[in-house]
């Protein structure tokens, strides 16, 4: 079965042989797009978060077969530069395995809520596990990114 | 040519040098998705490997039939113990773990057969077709019974004075239990073995390349020179990558098939495929005089090492030598065992034997304070070790700057840290709280009725680097050459960047020592000498020390040479001061290189009706000797504290007769951003004159002290004794009318 999607702005076709194949597996194993990570493949960690038609989803829980004609944005296409820069500058990246998924979730949050409070940040990122940072610097990075984006023409 | 740099004392920090927080070299690729973790690697013609594991904690293998698996189209190899080309066993300290089970299995999850196939799916299906005839046997799962039966990896006593006759005004005796914690790094175990010139290139994510090689080569029957170990990107470690996982299996499959073979565990297999933190049962008795000064401590400590040795031996040494914490006591009787059972093997996890006893001795200090009506900080102050005092092993607390002596009393690093809390107020209960800030959070379980606040402290003492006479060293090669007329330093080590920021630190050190701006890190591999493991909070000290020494040597060479005439290069091996083994009968001996202290204060809200806990604040005071990189250091303290919070209130691998019941992130919970409170840090620099830049290892101590602090705060809120971690809702609601 052939599925055509728009992945990070490019029309991309994948040939899949299992109806249940996950979008994460298609991205990583068939298309070689390894930016989205695989820490649980059960929808528990958020490492695989992508935007599907603009909405954040766990790519490990979405069947590729359902993605025909849809728009997929990974860490490569979903994240404004200032959000990435904020993670780098604030020390929000240690091993970085959680980072691509977190960045996509943060991009989505700031799109909906340009100046989130701490509780709003915690609620929005509750599905993204990070084992290294204790989350403090991730919260710093979200505020820093919000301030940087506010200074930019949106 | 720039002027050669004089040895600066104290060092003058170059831009991006030691003491600053330059951008880490791996940051950009980690935020743009291009950083290659081990699980991201792919090679032309690559096969996928998969492991068949035992469903039984103990069984004899009568036969294995691989015919059906081999017959599946797309399956290229199915291997069992009979196919291991070299030695049948491996291990970090003792080679006792079978590469593939040779006729019996000793824990659930033990590897029995391996498969290579064209896809991962096929490899998994083929593994299911391997028919293993097991004779199921009764497992030994009770660590105390194992010890009684003589099944243990190590017994280590500590004896000082006469603990049995010493008289005390107050005695507290309790039993404590620590559940089995998992490191749960987010990056799964993974790697690729690539055949090359009669040998192999192994792309692995490991904490210690050279130790892997030493264990892998004999099992493959290959000379180590024929195996090139190349570090792949590491998605966190915390001890889980100290023991081998995929390494020998993928190498065997690559040798057999002549094709690159990738192995990658899913989360369930990851829980079975690496060692965990030792669960512990500990019986403690503390006796003190009427002022709360410790007279004696007796401790009976049983750590469950599971089926194979891993690092149990060293974990027991830590548990025994650190069994009473940073407190002065004259009479000591400690007995510590690492039991051999049919439970999952346990080994290294951040804190390494220090975590379990810390929970017990800190709980005991609080119990004593309670019995005497003393403040928890005061009882710790009265018992703090000071310069010149001895640990229970006889090791003398090192010298500090004499200027720090307090009114004629020798300086006590712990009293120093405890005093810092005077200026940090406990957070006030805010009026009109958002419901998400209450226990239960968005679950909307309370509006504040039944919620009690509590405050508690925890102190942790951790040894830094390897102890007990281990010849620990690290190697660094540094080359300085002109590139486009500008001096560039190339640094080559085998040290694992597990996320802690060690690559960044190497660059900082080279900038500081050489005064150059550009520092290029060569890939970590086995073409340079061993760096030792990224564990025991040792890499800043050890590989930091090696890079510093190599830079100093390069600087000397550079003084007599014009770089235009060619590059200068130096390789240096760095060793810390020698340590001694613990005496097998008395436990005495200068067994540790360096000691580090950390103190937490936790503030919690507990819904005493539902048993829900919300940690609302964690304040941490830690002595790091010298701050090398403020941002990275804070990140270590935050992350270490989070793992201690996990052990306090949520994380435990639950086993039932040796079977793991919760091998998933659905059932094994690690702290989310909603569970972690905001943290306040006070970082103290009591330099260690023996260590590079005066630093003290910083990664582990916060993992020790946050757990007892949080549990003490929950006790304060509930009045319950709480002698087991993780504390679960049912522990908080027992005896309450429902
Ligand atoms: S990999 Fe998709 S949520 Fe964990
Ligand atoms: S940085 Fe390692 S999991 Fe988040």
Image (tube, grey):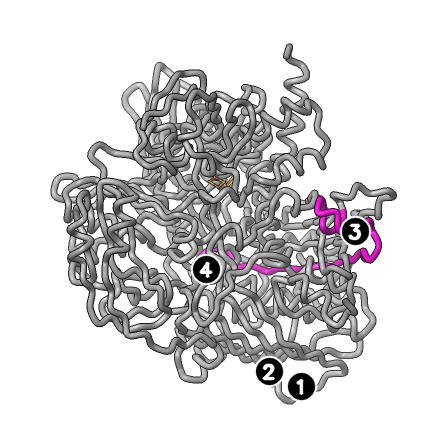
Camera-side residue: B216 or B322? B216
* Alpha carbon separation for disc pair 2 and 1: 9 Å
Mark 2: secondary structure:
loop
Residue in the image at 33% along x and 54% along y: B244
The residue that disc 3 covers is B446
Mark 1: secondary structure:
loop
Using residue B451 as the reference point, say whether residue B57 is left or right of it: left
Q: Residues within 10 Å of mark 3 (few under 14, many from 20)?
A: some
> Residue B694's x, y, as percent?
55, 47
Camera-side residue: B165 or B488? B165
* Alpha carbon separation for disc pair 3 and 4: 36 Å
Q: Nearer the viewer, mark 3 or mark 1?
A: 3
Magenta stretch, residue numbers: B438-466
Residue in the image at 64% along x and 55% along y: B706
Q: Quadrant of residue A54?
A: top right
Residue in the image at 19% along x and 43% along y: B74
Queried whether the magenta region covers residue B102, the answer comes back as no
The residue that disc 4 covers is B276
Q: CB at mark 2 closer than 8 A to ligand 2?
A: no
Same chain check for tags 2 and 1? yes
Using residue B303 as the reference point, say whether residue B645 is left or right of it: right
Q: Nearer the viewer, mark 2 or mark 1?
A: 1
**What is the chain identity of the residue bearing mark 4?**
B
Number of the label disc, if any, that sits on residue B166: 1
B44 lies above or below B195 = above
Q: Residues within 10 Å of mark 2 (few under 14, many from 20)?
A: few
> Residue B248's x, y, as percent?
25, 53
Q: Nearer the viewer, mark 3 or mark 4?
A: 3
**What is the chain identity of the residue bearing mark 1?**
B
* Alpha carbon separation for disc pair 3 and 1: 50 Å
Mark 3: secondary structure:
loop
């Amino acid at each position: 079965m052939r599925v055509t999607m728009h992945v990070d702005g490019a029309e991309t076709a994948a040939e899949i042989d299992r109806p249940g194949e996950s979008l994460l597996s298609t991205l990583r194993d068939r298309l070689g797009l390894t930016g989205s990570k695989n820490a649980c493949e059960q929808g528990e960690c958020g490492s695989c978060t992508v935007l599907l038609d603009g909405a954040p989803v766990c790519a490990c829980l979405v069947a590729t077969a359902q993605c025909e004609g849809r728009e997929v944005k990974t860490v490569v296409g979903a994240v404004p530069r200032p959000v990435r820069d904020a993670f780098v500058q604030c020390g929000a990246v240690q091993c970085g395995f959680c980072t691509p998924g977190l960045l996509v979730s943060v991009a989505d949050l700031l799109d909906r809520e340009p100046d989130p409070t701490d509780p709003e940040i915690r609620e929005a990122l509750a599905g993204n596990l990070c084992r290294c940072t204790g989350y403090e610097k991730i919260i710093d990075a979200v505020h820093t990114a919000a301030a940087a984006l506010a200074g930019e023409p949106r | 040519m720039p002027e050669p740099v004089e040895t600066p004392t104290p060092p003058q920090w170059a831009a991006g040098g030691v003491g600053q927080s330059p951008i880490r070299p791996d940051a950009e690729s980690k935020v743009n998705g291009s950083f290659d973790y081990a699980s991201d690697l792919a090679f032309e013609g690559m096969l996928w490997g998969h492991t068949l594991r035992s469903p039984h904690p103990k069984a004899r293998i009568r036969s294995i039939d691989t015919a059906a698996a081999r017959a599946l189209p797309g399956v290229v190899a199915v291997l069992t113990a009979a196919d291991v080309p070299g030695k049948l066993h491996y291990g970090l300290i003792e080679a006792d773990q079978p590469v593939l089970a040779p006729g019996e299995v000793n824990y659930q999850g033990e590897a029995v057969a391996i498969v290579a196939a064209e896809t991962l799916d096929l490899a998994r299906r083929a593994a299911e077709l391997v028919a293993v005839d097991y004779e199921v046997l009764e497992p030994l799962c009770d660590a105390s019974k194992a010890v009684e039966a003589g099944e243990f990896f190590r017994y280590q006593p500590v004896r000082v004075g006469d603990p049995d006759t010493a008289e005390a005004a107050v005695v507290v005796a309790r039993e404590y239990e620590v559940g089995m914690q998992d490191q749960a790094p987010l990056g799964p175990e993974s790697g690729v073995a690539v055949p090359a010139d009669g040998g192999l290139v192994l792309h692995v994510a490991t904490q210690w390349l050279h130790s892997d090689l030493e264990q892998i080569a004999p099992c493959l029957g290959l000379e180590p020179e024929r195996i090139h170990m190349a570090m792949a990107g590491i998605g966190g470690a915390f001890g889980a990558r100290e023991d081998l996982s995929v390494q020998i299996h993928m190498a065997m499959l690559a040798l057999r098939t002549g094709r690159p073979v990738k192995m990658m565990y899913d989360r369930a297999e990851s829980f079975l495929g690496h060692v965990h933190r030792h669960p512990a049962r500990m019986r403690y008795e503390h006796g003190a005089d009427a002022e709360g000064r410790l007279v004696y401590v007796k401790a009976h400590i049983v750590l469950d090492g599971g089926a194979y040795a891993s690092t149990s031996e060293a974990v027991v040494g830590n548990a025994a030598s650190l069994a009473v914490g940073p407190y002065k006591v004259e009479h000591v009787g400690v007995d510590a065992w690492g039991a051999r059972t049919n439970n999952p093997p346990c080994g290294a996890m951040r804190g390494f034997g220090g975590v379990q006893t810390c929970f017990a001795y800190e709980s005991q200090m609080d119990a004593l304070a309670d019995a005497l009506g003393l403040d928890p900080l005061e009882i710790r102050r009265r018992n703090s070790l000071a310069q010149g005092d001895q640990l229970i092993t006889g090791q003398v607390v090192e010298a500090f700057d004499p200027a720090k002596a307090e009114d004629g009393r020798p300086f006590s690093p712990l009293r120093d840290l405890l005093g810092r809390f005077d200026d940090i107020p406990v957070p006030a209960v805010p009026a009109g709280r958002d419901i998400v800030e209450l226990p239960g959070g968005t679950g909307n379980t309370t509006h504040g009725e039944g919620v009690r606040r509590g405050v508690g402290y925890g102190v942790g003492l951790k040894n830094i680097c390897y102890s007990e006479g281990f010849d620990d060293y690290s190697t660094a090669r540094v080359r300085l050459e002109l590139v486009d007329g500008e001096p560039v330093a190339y640094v080559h080590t085998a040290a694992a960047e597990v996320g802690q920021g060690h690559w960044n630190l190497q660059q900082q050190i080279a900038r500081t020592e050489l005064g150059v701006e550009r520092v290029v890190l060569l890939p970590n591999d086995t073409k340079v000498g061993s760096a030792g493991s990224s564990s025991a909070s040792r890499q800043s000290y050890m590989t930091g020390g090696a890079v510093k020494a190599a830079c100093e040597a390069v600087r000397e060479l550079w003084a007599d040479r014009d770089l235009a005439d060619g590059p200068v290069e130096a390789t240096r091996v760095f060793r810390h001061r020698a340590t001694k083994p613990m005496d097998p009968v008395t436990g005495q001996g200068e067994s540790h290189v360096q000691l580090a202290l950390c103190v937490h204060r936790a503030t919690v809200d507990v819904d005493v009706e539902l048993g829900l806990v919300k940690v609302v604040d964690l304040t941490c005071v830690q002595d790091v000797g010298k701050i090398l990189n403020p941002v990275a250091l804070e990140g270590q303290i935050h992350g270490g504290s989070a793992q201690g919070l996990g052990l306090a209130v949520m994380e435990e691998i639950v086993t039932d007769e040796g079977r793991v019941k919760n091998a998933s992130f659905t059932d094994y919970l690690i702290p989310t951003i909603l569970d972690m409170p905001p943290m306040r840090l006070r970082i103290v620099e009591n330099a260690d004159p023996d260590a590079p830049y005066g630093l003290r290892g910083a990664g582990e101590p916060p993992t020790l002290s946050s757990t007892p602090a949080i549990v003490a705060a929950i006790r304060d809120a509930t009045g319950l004794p709480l002698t087991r971690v993780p504390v679960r809702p049912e522990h908080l609601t027992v005896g309450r009318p429902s």
